[in-house]
Amino acid sequence: MNGEYKGKIKTLLDAVPPGALVDSKWMNRHNIADSTYHDYVRRGWLLRLAQGLFLRPSSAMKRGDPLPWRVVVASMHQIMELDFHVGGISALNLQGFAHFVQMSGKDRVLLYATRLPGWLDAINTDATFERRSIKLFNDPYLGIQALERDGPTFAGPASFPLSTPERGVLEAMDELSEDSDFYELDRVFEGLVNLRPSLLMGLLQDCRKVKVVRLFFAFGERHRHAWFPYLDEHALNFGSGDRQLVKSGRIHPKYRITVPAWFMEASAD
């Protein structure tokens, strides 16, 4: 085994710990040719999972078992350096604000990105990845933070980017369309007692959708958390005209957006 080959193996072993994923684009960037990583597969140093995607085997993972979704997103961030974040209700759930149990099927993980790899649909994981646009805000990185976890991922601290609660709740509001969605998000909003008004104002000013800004204030007036009076409505664009979100709802008298009837009638106490 020549020195160049040994160097490439060391590059792979140093950067990709057991249990992590790596793609062919990463290996090509590190001057590991197609023929070389095909040899890694033959030798058992890598396991091919899909076209252009490989797993460095780990004794803790059994062949055929679904990959933990945190392994996938941590590998995408830490190793492949893909540009994305976990957002919306998924981010709120990870930070302890959403408590709704998936009764059947896999968990949903919302990934916000301009582009995601095609192999996400081909691999066997314990969650369903759903793609979302990053166009809700002018600044795609405002209100994004790193979530660090020790497991269940590969060796060492694993991290990946996700929306702060302030951004996550606005992303979740952009998805609202059904009465049941309103009910779930209303319960989530009830627990958002420590949001940061300065970050909220930045996000609301940066938000491209008037309906989301209006809806956030409708929820804010309903729950009246301590941070709510610190938001400056006069510095925001609420647009004009009515906005319809639900087919059989009521127009909010102040923010002129349709919400479920119970949202207007029920007390938020």
Image: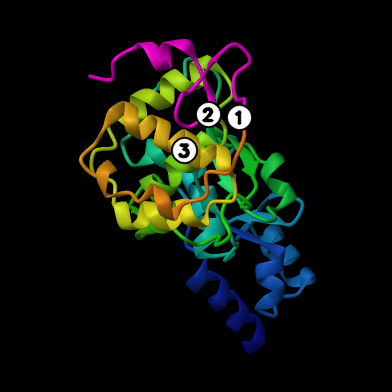
* Relative to 226, 45 lies left or right: right
Residue 74 is covered by the magenta coloring: no
User: Camera-side residue: 269 or 36?
Assistant: 269
- What residue appears at the point 35 percent right and 29 percent down from the top-left corner? 188
Q: CA distance from mark 1 to mark 3?
A: 29 Å
Q: Nearer the viewer, mark 1 or mark 3?
A: 1
Q: Is residue 63 left or right of residue 97?
A: right
Would you say the residues marked 1 and 3 are in contact, meaning their CB atoms lie under 8 Å apart?
no
Which residue in the structure is indicated by mark 3?
A: 90
Dominant secondary-structure state across the stretch colored magenta: loop
Q: Position of residue 86 (x, y in %)?
A: 50, 47
Name the residue that disc number 2 marks: 256
Determine the secondary structure under disc 3. Answer: helix
Q: Are marks 2 and 3 in contact (CB under 8 Å)?
A: no
Residue type, numbered disc 1: Asp
Q: Which residue is mark 1?
A: 242
Alpha carbons under labels 2 and 1: distance apart: 5 Å
Is 21 situated left or right of 27 in this image? Answer: left
| Image location of residue 220, percent across then percent down | 34, 34
Pick the residue in front: 85 or 218.
218
Q: Does the magenta run of residues contain 247?
A: yes
